[in-house]
Structure formats: structure tokens, C-alpha cells
Amino acid sequence: MKRLISLLLCLLLLPAITARAQKACTDVPGCDATTGVPASVLAAYPEPAVRPLVVNETELTSRIYRQVRAGMQVYNAPGGTLVTTTGGYSFVTVEATQGEWSQIGKEQWALNTFLSENVVLSRFAGVRLPDDGLPYPMAWTLRHLRAAAVPGGDESPNNPFMYRYTRVTLYAYVEIDGKRWYQIGGGQWIHQYDVAKITPIERPADVDTDKWVSVDLYEQVLVAYEGETPVFATLISSGLKDWPTNEGLFHIYLRYPETDMSGAFQRPDFYYLQDVPWTMYFDGDIALHGTYWHDGFGYRQSHGCVNMSITDAKWLYDWSADEFDFTIPQDTGAAVYVYSSGAYTE
């Protein structure tokens, strides 16, 4: 699914990279196309110099989310009067329970047989970036894997097993058949499709707020900036092919600690999501928001919104709050710059 990088496209779409640009192995002193950068480089910088956000346990335990099974009947009270029947891709928040019934809203009750077990929430969290930038780009792995021993090779049983969302340093790359293999350690190489990398950009000329965010639809990475300095980065999930997230420059114009979302009424792709946390609308009904119904960050998943983990969404919601001036009618908040550093192959 991921990713065929075109260097020409990157140069056209990106302003300029503020961190050290990713270098081909041939451009790195002492780098060999098979063994990679010298061992001294790996020893001097063994892991990304970032500070991961602490997973927000309060947010992950403050609500009980459950998925709805098709044909769920909603009553005004346990054993009361039928109000409606719902289905589709729907999730609700359980506010209280009474025997075999769960309350899912004011005067809204459903039998537990129509509800899943409690949704297991993603514990993924982004990273705070150093003020002076990263000496080498950082990326997250997008699946469980073992790195290859050489560029273009198969996974090596001699390399350590890495879980999805592992943070890695991209020291250099080698291109094989037009695709990049990144060195992430001694005798450790990983295909470009298996990572999502942080690539800070220069502040676009039209960005008019001190705090702003960039959303790279290709890498599925969001970066938050204060002035010219990238301060935070994380994985996101943007719109699927049929429901793309629009590129361009926007501003957060409406914020909710939690709000309901629904769409595609009476269509096969109907969805209803109750109590979506830390929602920041920036392009019509497209928003940055916390996501409890999937853990697929790093891949496109949504109907256009920019999905984040709940921990990340809460951090971004709080961080961006002071860009609003509530004494100014219809004031807008932090700028949101959406772009693509490459093109999907499908």
C-alpha cells in the first residue's frame, strides 16, 4: 500500500526541510551500500533524541466505548418504549448499566446483547522534539517485523523483533528498484513502505499563527510547530481514497472536548461515533480529533478527518488553545497546513 517516493515530487510539494535532510548512503562519509554508516556513527547516536508523551491514563479510562451490532434497538428506559433502531459502523459511550441494559445517552437504553465488549483503546503516543532538531530523521515502524541484514534482503532472524510503532533512526538510505531501504542500525535495513518518517518543513509564507501544524498525507505524520521550530510529531490516519483529506492551508475554527459524528446516512458506509474526544474542526466538517475505534495510525482510515490517538489529541487540544482569542468575534485558531510529500501507488 505504501509508498513510492518521487524525489522530484517532494521538491515540488515541500517548502524546505528544517531538520537535516535524509541522505543517500553515497552522500554520507564512510557509508557503504551494504554495511551502511560507520559503527562510530551508530555508537554516537544509538536512538532518537525525542521525549515520548506519557500515555494519558485519565483519558483512556474516563469513558467506556462499545461498538454497536446491526439492528440495535434503542429504548427510552430499560424495558421501555422503542425509540429507534440503529446499525452501520457505530460506536456509543456507556454511561450506566442496569441489569442487562446499558444507558447510551439521555433516555436512551440498549440491551447489552447489541453491544460489544469494551473497546481497547490505542496506547500509542507521539513525541516531543528537541529545540535544536534531530541529527537524523526519526520514523515509526508500521508493522511487526525484523530488519533485513542487507538492503533489499529478507527479514533476518538474527535481528531483534520490533513491534509496530517502534521508534527508529534513519541514518542513510540505499535505493533499489526505485525504492528506499533505510539503515536503522548495524546490519539492519528496512523498506520505505514499513516506516512513517518525521519530515519537518519550513513555515509556509501564509501561515499567520505562532502555533501551527503540518499534516503530511503521504507519510501520515503530523508535526506541531512554535514559530519556525517543530516541537511535537505523531502518526495520524487521514481520509481514505474515496473520502480524501483536502490539501491546503486552514485554521482551526471550532473546538469541542467531545462531540458526536455521523455521516453517509442511509448508505452502506453509514457511521455514527458518539463522544469523539478533543475535536478541532479546520475544514468544514473535517477535524483533527481523538480516535477510539481503531489503532491503525500511520495508514489512511477515515472519511476525511485527521485521526489521532486520544493521548495525542488531548495534548494538541491543550497546546493549541491559546491561539484562540475569545474576545474577537469569529476568531480562528492555529493554522493547519495539509500537504503530501509523495504519491500513493493506489
Image: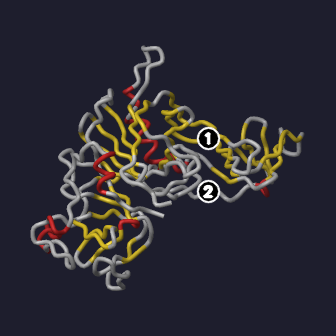
Q: Is residue 104 left or right of residue 9?
A: right
- Which mark is on residue 119? 2
**326 or 190, which is in the foreground?**
190
Q: Amino acid at mark 1?
A: Asp
Disc 1 designates what residue?
275
**Within 10 Å of the Cα at label 2, are there few (<14), some (14-19), or many (20+) other Cα atoms?**
some
Cα–Cα span, label 1 and label 2: 14 Å
- Which mark is on residue 5? none
Residue 3 lies, in percent from the top left, at 41, 62
**302 or 144, which is in the foreground?**
302
Compared to 119, does 340 lie above or below? above
The image quarter containing residue 118 is bottom right
Going from N to C along the chain, the mark reached first, 1 or 2, is 2
Scheme by which the image is coloured: secondary structure
Disc tally is 2
Q: At x 46% / y 61%, what residue is drawn?
A: 345
Q: At x 78% / y 46%, what residue is drawn?
A: 86
Residue 19 lies, in percent from the top left, at 21, 50
Q: At x 59% / y 50%, what residue is drawn?
A: 242
**99 or 255, which is in the foreground?**
255
Query: Do we see residue 169 in this rendering?
Result: yes
